[in-house]
Image: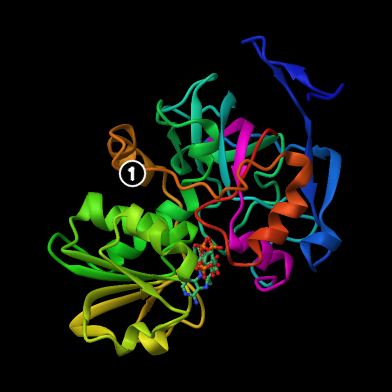
Amino acid sequence: MATEASSTDPTNITIPSHTKAWFYSQHGKPLDILKLHPNWPIPQLKHDQLLIKVVAASINPVDYKRMHALFKDSDPHLPIVPGFDVAGIVIKVGSEVVRFKVGDEVYGDINEEGLSNLKSLGTLSEYTIAEERLLAHKPKNLSFIEAASVPLAMETAYEGLERADFSAGKSILVLGGAGGVGSFAIQLAKHVYGASKIAATSSTGKLQFLRNLGVDLPIDYTKENFEDLPEKFDVIYDAVGQVDRAVKAIKEGGKIVSIAPPGFPPAIFFVLTSKGSILEKLRPYFESGQLKPVLDPKTPVPFSDVIEAFSYLETSRAVGKIVIYPI
Ligand SMILES: NC(=O)C1=CN([C@@H]2O[C@H](COP(=O)(O)OP(=O)(O)OC[C@H]3O[C@@H](n4cnc5c(N)ncnc54)[C@H](OP(=O)(O)O)[C@@H]3O)[C@@H](O)[C@H]2O)C=CC1
Ligand SMILES: CC[C@H]1OC(C)=C(O)C1=O
């Protein structure tokens, strides 16, 4: 909802100066610190930025980890509006923007670096801002809810496979296959890279979900240890934080990538860099249906229930992504 302080753009779209947004001004549990602000100020657009009406936003573990002050040294000063992933409609463009125009349907992760130079105005807001290079045109066959579920998790999955030099004919073990990142890593390995064999870990109740995603060897971590299996792998994608065990399951000359602390050598530990170009590159795979968004059964969660959404995400039991909609 635009406020009385808004202005009217020549395209006759009302440009708001403030927005309703979830924010926190102290660290702690989402349940205790998240509040709804009726009039959060919207910063002036920089030349390479776009102002987006948020239609849907997905939440990620980094959001609650930031609330728990795990990254307070790299976080902007409080208060902060959390949220990295957005799918929405462009309502204003900066003077240097060339790939997008007002009215375009876009999606992306609005923080270029996963843990540094983070924006104070995140995506759990009616409006948000992002640089052109972080965004892509929403695939026409994806709803806004589906599109919002993709950016951070998909871009992390993709960057990890690239860092591991994954390629056709190689085998891969995904630790944490049912999560947001793991479920995309499996899909990319199968449909984009041409894996020879895909193994993944989950608890008992998610094994069929893994099979449906295309996993050849689902491993029930409540019943067996992946590192005790005779099979070793060319690449291991660790989305849980099990590098100490992964080193016993990797082939000679194989590569381990890790995204969950305490990643250490020989694993390649990284924090994603958000790139709209990755989403544009993967668009044909989404449009053909080879890549599919994975939505947790609780999705969509209405804007008013963001606190409950984080409480569930913090259980580390989500299947795919939790998306906030409508906003
Ligand atoms: N470095 C980076 O750039 C990034 C790091 N991350 C981090 O990576 C991790 C995963 O992120 P994301 O996928 O969004 O998380 P999710 O919250 O989506 O993961 C939930 C899933 O994790 C699975 N899981 C939990 N524990 C285990 C386990 N011991 N073995 C196998 N599966 C398990 C659960 O399945 P089940 O119920 O069967 O256990 C559940 O389906 C998080 O720690 C996150 O902070 C995420 C993105 C970027
Ligand atoms: C240090 C890993 C950290 O970075 C992101 C984006 C997370 O979700 C993390 O846990």
Residue 5, located in which quarter of the rendered image? top right
Going 40% across and 30% down the picture, which residue do you hit? 139
Q: Is residue 54 magenta?
A: yes
Q: Is residue 130 above or below residue 13?
A: below
Magenta segment boundaries in residue numbering: 49-72
Query: Residue tagged by mark 1?
Result: 291
Quarter of the image with the C terminus in it: top right
Three-letter code, disc 1: Leu
Quarter of the image with the N terminus in it: top right
Q: Is residue 249 magenta?
A: no
Going 66% across and 68% down the picture, which residue do you hit? 65
Q: Is residue 102 left or right of residue 133?
A: right
Q: How many marks?
A: 1
Element under label 1? loop
Where residue 133 appears, as percent x and y from the top left, is: 44, 41
User: From the Cβ of disc 1, is ligand 1 less than 8 Å away?
Assistant: no
Residue 229, located in which quarter of the rendered image? bottom left
Where residue 293 appears, as percent x and y from the top left, is: 44, 44
Q: Is residue 160 left or right of residue 33?
A: left
